Amino acid sequence: MTDTYARTTNTWRNWAGNVTTRPARVESPASVDELAEVLRRASEDGLKVKPVGTGHSFTAAAATDGVLIRPDLLAGIRGIDREAMTVTVEAGTPLKRLNAALAREGLSLTNMGDIMEQTVAGATSTGTHGTGRDSASVSAQIRALELVTADGTVLSCSADEHPDVFAVARIGLGALGVVTAVTFAIEPVFLLTAREEPMTFDRVTADFDQLVTDNEHFEFYWFPHTGNCNTKRNNRSAGPAAPPGRVSGWIEDELLSNGIFQVACSVGRAVPAAIPSLARISSRALSARTYTDIPYKVFTSPRRVRFVEMEYAVPREAAVDALRELKAMVERSPLRISFPVEVRTAPADDMALSTASGRESAYIAVHLYRGTPYQAYFTAVERIMTGYDGRPHWGKIHTRDAGYLSGSYPRFGEFTAVRDRLDPDRLFANDYLRRVLGD
């Protein structure tokens, strides 16, 4: 990934390029003590503070005109506890570095999202997730975290220590303080067999519940303007490892999924009328394949075509109805959609602001190529998803506010009460948090 920080100015842009901010200062503390000093000086100067990761959120969750904290120097593994089966990692560590380091030790996270460029704190603070019948988001695998609050206090939080903070801080939106370290549950590295297979929209929606029930990790992509989907089933395997061949893997993951897809998106942006034809070609380009490898090499994929995204979590039982309504909306509209729609699932969890808090969930994500006007499409999708009590992903584009979200999250008040206690003067506030949490 290219560096998301402009080196010659204080201008910061996110990965998609749809959020730009000019902080008064940019700080890169190298220790918890240095971070506490940064917070103290910012408070004295009347400046707000926001930590930022690699910029993979599409919202302005990290934007500030005050002090922007870069995590570059707060990186690395603090320690692995093989008895407790946990790893403690500095918050600025990229997930790809964590995954590779664990693999070298014969260890792994249980589940993960489909990209691994984000920092540990950025991914967990916004609720990054993959797909799973039984295993939940990255944040659900947290067993403890270290948080520096507005007054410089260093809180070590877990189910046993400051449990009220731990209950809400695993997905904290950067509203409670600056996360400096995270302790994850880990397990011995295992093998996953991935089975990727084209399937019609009608079949995958008719069999959706069975596909989810029968597989540890199931997801699919529907190509708008077609009746075609591509499905992916990941299940644990006794082996042996059988990764994709170097040439065939490059063709599928780089040439087709990135190179040719980039060209198709560029053509579609210039000539929208060509998109339905391109979609029919794209939906038939990926063939069925099966391979077996260690988890992060199966769960994650390179994402080099830049886009903007909206994603909503709906109750799992509403997923098919919501998706069929979305398909019908696209078909009767003049919209031309070049990106596939992604559908994943998650079990219910116990985190206050998790999109799967208290309910089994399905995620429906829509994307558009960067630079393409997205408002009409995303507005129409959001109208559908909110009709099913959808919860927007905290790091992806949406227009919901505290009034809506407080009604959608039963434990919303629990989160805001902890926020009031830890950050009464709103040192970590910005426009995005004022909208989604209130002030």
Image: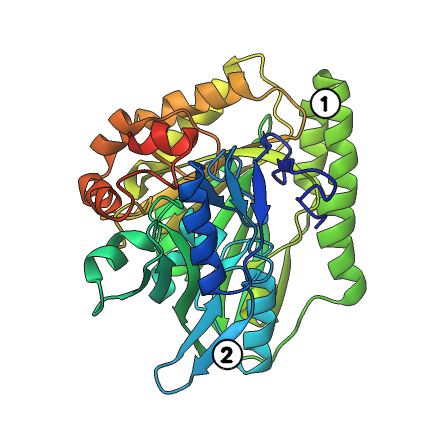
User: What kind of residue is marked 1?
Assistant: Arg
- Viewer-proximal residue among 34 and 17: 34
Which of the numbered marks, if any, corresponds to residue 286? Answer: none
Q: Which element carries disc 2, helix, strand or loop?
A: strand
User: What kind of residue is marked 2?
Assistant: Leu
| Residue 400 pos. (x, y %) | 36, 26
- Mark 2, Cα crowd under 10 Å, few <14 / some 14-19 / many 20+, is many
Query: Is 425 situated left or right of 335 in this image?
Result: left
Which of the marked residues, 2 or 1, is nearer the chain's N terminus?
2
Q: Which element carries disc 1, helix, strand or loop?
A: helix
- Position above or below: 206 against 397: below
Q: Residue at x 19, y 45 (%)?
A: 414
Query: Is 374 situated left or right of 432 in this image?
Result: right
| Residue 332 pos. (x, y %) | 51, 14
Q: Which residue is mark 1?
A: 269
- Position above or below: 66 against 176: above
Where, quadrant-wise, is the C terminus in this rendering?
Answer: top left
**Residue 384, quarter of picture:** top left
| Residue 113 pos. (x, y %) | 50, 54
**Residue 200, quarter of picture:** top right
Question: From mark 2 to mark 1, how far is it between C-alphas?
Answer: 43 Å
Q: Residue at x 22, y 48 (%)?
A: 358
Query: Is 7 situated left or right of 363 in this image?
Result: right
Q: Residue at x 72, y 31 (%)?
A: 265
Residue at the far front: name it. Answer: 44
Which of the numbered marks, if any, corresponds to residue 107? Answer: 2
| Residue 185 pos. (x, y %) | 38, 72
